[in-house]
Image (cartoon, coloured by chain):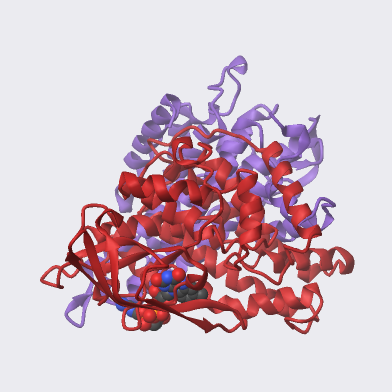
Chain colours: A red, B purple
Amino acid sequence: MFRLFPHPDAQPEVHDPAAALRAEVRAFLAEERESGAIRPGRQGWTTWDRGFSLRAAARGYVGMTLPPEFGGHGRSAWERYVVCEEMLAAGAPLGSHWIADRQSAPQILRHGSEAVKRAILPRVARGEITFGIGMSEPDSGSDLSSIRTRADPVEGGFRLDGRKIWTTNAQHAEYIICLCRTAPKGEDRYAGLSQLVVPMDSPGITVRPLRNLADEEELNEITFDSVFVPADHLLGQGGDGWALVNAELAFERSGPDRILSSFGVLAVMAQMLAETRDPRGIAELGGLVARLTAIRQLSLQINAMLGRGEKVGGIATVMKDLGTTLEQDIPEVARRLMDIMPALDGDTPAATLATAILNAPCYSLRGGTREILKGIIARELGLR
Amino acid sequence: MSENARLLDDMAERMFGQFLADPLARADATLPERLAEAAVEAGLPLALVPEADGGMGATLEDAAIIAWRAGYHAAPLPVVTLLLAPTLPIEGPFALAAPGAQLAEGPSERIALVAADTLTLHAAEPAVTALDHRPWVRPTGEAIETHSLAGIEDRLRMQGACLTAAAMLGAMQRACEITIEYANTRRQFGRPLAAFQAIQHRIAEAASEQTVAQAAVAGAIRAADGGWSRPILWQSAKVQAGRAASVVTATAHQVLGAIGFTEEHVLHHYSKKLWVWRDAWGRQAALEAGIGQAAVADARGLWSHIVDTEETQHG
Ligand SMILES: Cc1cc2nc3c(=O)[nH]c(=O)nc-3n(C[C@H](O)[C@H](O)[C@H](O)COP(=O)(O)OP(=O)(O)OC[C@H]3O[C@@H](n4cnc5c(N)ncnc54)[C@H](O)[C@@H]3O)c2cc1C
């Protein structure tokens, strides 16, 4: 059983409302709204906008926790959390830097070669580059051990062949971190996997965008046809890709982006209820706000643990599962409470609701499906 | 955990364990009385009393650990009253109603009611028996004592909700443990129940709700001790504890099958307590409505309402 309270070794809570930092980020976001870069309710955190990321990075909001020697700002996990949640709540387009900032850069910092760290991390912190997550394949989704993309050793590096799919923003990406087989699948199906940092301008790569339910081209299929990847672009030791992928997923699963994807709908509901004062609606809203507040506390505690370098394991999985369920519940409650016809080209409330309804199915798929998460939790509970 | 918390935790565990480890002990009608006496002897009710008044001056977190242990053992005693009553200027034993309520867990010949800044003491008479078989009492007649105490309602609402939620965490912890143990040992179709994915997922859901409840309660209690408490924190924690209680009890009963529906198994002591607590010291639905009202009334907007610490509580 997961034990957070009472916890024999609990660290004392440090209270920092971060009011000054929040005010600073909100001022930046207000400018971005003013200029039209943020279109509330019509974007998600995967929406790609390089200009926004460059401006955010210029303010120091990207690569915040990276060490200064790699171009980062050496700020705390909590400060990064504050900036992220402020941007998510505002519905900002984070797609150009989000994946690099959330998981690729920390992964490279921990497991990358010196040369790759020096070449790539400062560019992440400047908001100049987009990363893709190269895990899923046409025949391998939940069961990543079955992937077939392979990297064979060649003079000075690897030759990469295979296909990846559902790679968010790959058409814009400068790099992807690609999970591949460096040894054939044997007894232990998790052995022989490795992660490579693949420059997307390498010869032999084709990217085909796929249109999603919300009419956006964010997902892609990537084909690698004898792509050369330099040896120093390997993460870790080689063959330890399964452990690496799981470490990467811990960063992917516990953040505010797993609670706030449909926050815009909640904000619209609150505004509307402030006028109508419908008691049933207010009670429903209260239930959702309570849930959000409770799950956010879990997310904050995980963030603090990650910041201290502690292992979080199944708790991050719990957070993602319940957080994304809340993200899916919000539009369902909203459509019952509000007499709004969801329409992408409607006014802000109509578009916000439409965006949430059309994106909701993916919340419990991306980053590991609900069923897979529950399986991980059950295993940690000792059920088998 | 502080040194103080560790001591209290050990003491409470030893005391409740000693009385309740044997399931048959609960059959003895004198158990609640003996348990209450032992708690007093161990000094547990003095936890929240300031040192200047001869108490321990413990933090809310320390006191919550006592409540957690009471929950973990489904102890038949009003643990919230036990911890909060000694902080009030009334001599001798009395039942304490949650602010605004007219009923309190007994047994007791006297009942204290709280409304706004006023605390009144009344004679009590038996009212109803709660789901967990505990006797509840109600006031009869005029107030025998009246005290004016600034901020008493807000303090008791917050502390009562946090302590109740802490007791719920303890009870849910035990209920989850019981469920997991049972799923791993009971076999059907030649396999342990835990081998079935439907069972695994159901238990994972229950443990997940309990995990979120732990985080929310810990956050609310530390905010209270640290001086940055906000109603939304403790109200959400109590709401989440209530939701988790519904899921944990439903799951435990489903997984245990018929045996859990009988007195033969200890599970019911936990589920009944949880069913009482989810609507005691802050009724779940009322708290949700209150959170919603405060959210829509906040001119700063919803996001600010959720994350910003009020100006007055800065630093
Ligand atoms: C919007 C979006 C963005 C994404 N972005 C990326 C990305 O950037 N990079 C990337 O690599 N991938 C990405 N993905 C892919 C995502 O990680 C996969 O969709 C996910 O892992 C599931 O794989 P699948 O779609 O092949 O489904 P499958 O694995 O085929 O599963 C189908 C269904 O079966 C269930 N199932 C499978 N196995 C079990 C089991 N053992 N027990 C019970 N049920 C099971 C699943 O839960 C699911 O409900 C993205 C997906 C979406 C929707």
Residue farthest left in this picture: A187
As drawn, B208 above or below A364:
above
Q: Residue furthest right?
A: A275
Quadrant assignment for ligand 1: bottom left
Q: Is residue B54 left or right of residue B290?
A: left
Q: Residue at x 47, y 50 (%)?
A: B169
Q: Residue at x 66, y 42 (%)?
A: B158
Instruction: Report if residue A202 is visible in the image.
Output: yes
Q: Furthest-top residue in view?
A: B52
Spot occupied by residue A255 in the image (x, y as percentages of width and height):
51, 55
**Residue A226 screen position, x and y as percent:** 27, 75
Nearest the eye: A377 or A28: A28
Left or right position of A378 against B231: left
B174 up-or-down from A367: above or below: above
Question: Does residue B121 appear in the picture of this structure?
Answer: no
Judging depth in this view, the residue of A305 and A133 nearest the camera is A133
Find residue A352 and report its horizontal and vertical position in percent: 72, 73
Q: Residue at x 38, y 47 (%)?
A: A117
Near-viewer residue (B221 or A367): A367
Q: Position of residue A158 (x, y in %)?
A: 23, 65
In screen coordinates, is B16 left or right of A383? right
Quadrant (top left, top right, bottom left, bottom right) of the N terminus of chain B: top left
Front-lying residue, A209 or B176? A209
Q: Quadrant of the C terminus of chain B?
A: top right
Q: What residue is shown at x 38% (from left), y 54% (from top)? A: B174
